[in-house]
Image (cartoon, rainbow, N blue to C red):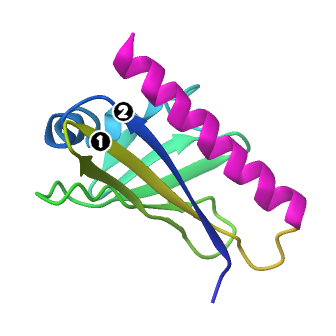
């Protein structure tokens, strides 16, 4: 079992409206900093891009009525990294949640950096949608 931390942020929009706005893979580069410097290119069920280090392949959960936006990132170093993501209703607003799993052999410092990265990306999403 991998240690994990779930990061969440409240966005003052109806959850379904929010999900319908952000679920598309080509929307991710607008707020996900690891993808912001590149273009996502779809090849079948996989999207390819250039990440901070090298080429990256990403698989996204299909559109669904549950607010699930899971994605799987393959940086070419073996197995995919699973990134669970949800949009959950919170009365008139919504919570966006991303779970970060500490990967095998990852240091405490690197895990903390990854969690902070996700926090910054969620803040960027909030800013994009509320300004």
- For the point 10% across and 57% down, the residue is 65
The mark found on residue 94 in the picture is: 1
Q: How far across and down, in percent of the image, does residue 127 sit? A: 47, 19
Identify the disc placed on residue 6.
Answer: none
Q: Quadrant of residue 27?
A: top left
Q: Position of residue 84 (x, y in %)?
A: 43, 64
Image: magenta residue range: 108-131
Task: Please tell me in which quadrant of the rendered image residue 103 appears.
Answer: bottom right
| In-front residue for pair 68/26 | 68
Query: Residue 111 colored magenta?
Result: yes
At a point 87% along the width and 65% down the height, the residue shown is: 108
Q: Are marks 2 and 1 in contact (CB under 8 Å)?
A: yes
**Quadrant where the N terminus lies?**
bottom right
- In three-dimensional space, the C-alpha distance between marks 2 and 1, rounded to whole angstroms, equals 5 Å
52 in the magenta segment:
no
Query: In the rendered view of the protein, which quadrant contains the C terminus?
Result: top left
Main SS, magenta region, reads helix
Q: Which residue is mark 2?
A: 11
In this view, the residue farthest toward the top is: 131
User: Does residue 99 appear left or right of residue 67 in this picture?
Assistant: right
**Numbered disc 2: secondary structure:** strand
- At horizontal 84% and vertical 77% (from top left) the residue drawn is 105
């Amino acid at each position: 079992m991998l240690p994990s931390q779930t990061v969440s942020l409240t966005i003052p929009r109806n959850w379904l409206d929010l999900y319908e706005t952000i679920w598309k893979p080509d929307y991710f580069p607008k707020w996900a900093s690891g993808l912001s410097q590149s273009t996502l290119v779809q090849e079948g069920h996989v999207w390819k891009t250039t990440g901070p280090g090298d080429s990256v392949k990403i698989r996204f959960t299909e559109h669904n009525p549950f607010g699930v936006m899971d994605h799987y990132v393959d940086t070419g170093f073996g197995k995919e990294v699973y990134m669970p993501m949800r949009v959950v209703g919170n009365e008139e607003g919504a919570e966006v949640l991303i779970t970060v799993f500490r990967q095998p052999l990852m240091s405490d410092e690197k895990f903390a950096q990854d969690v902070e990265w996700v926090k910054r990306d969620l803040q960027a999403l909030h800013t994009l949608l509320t300004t």
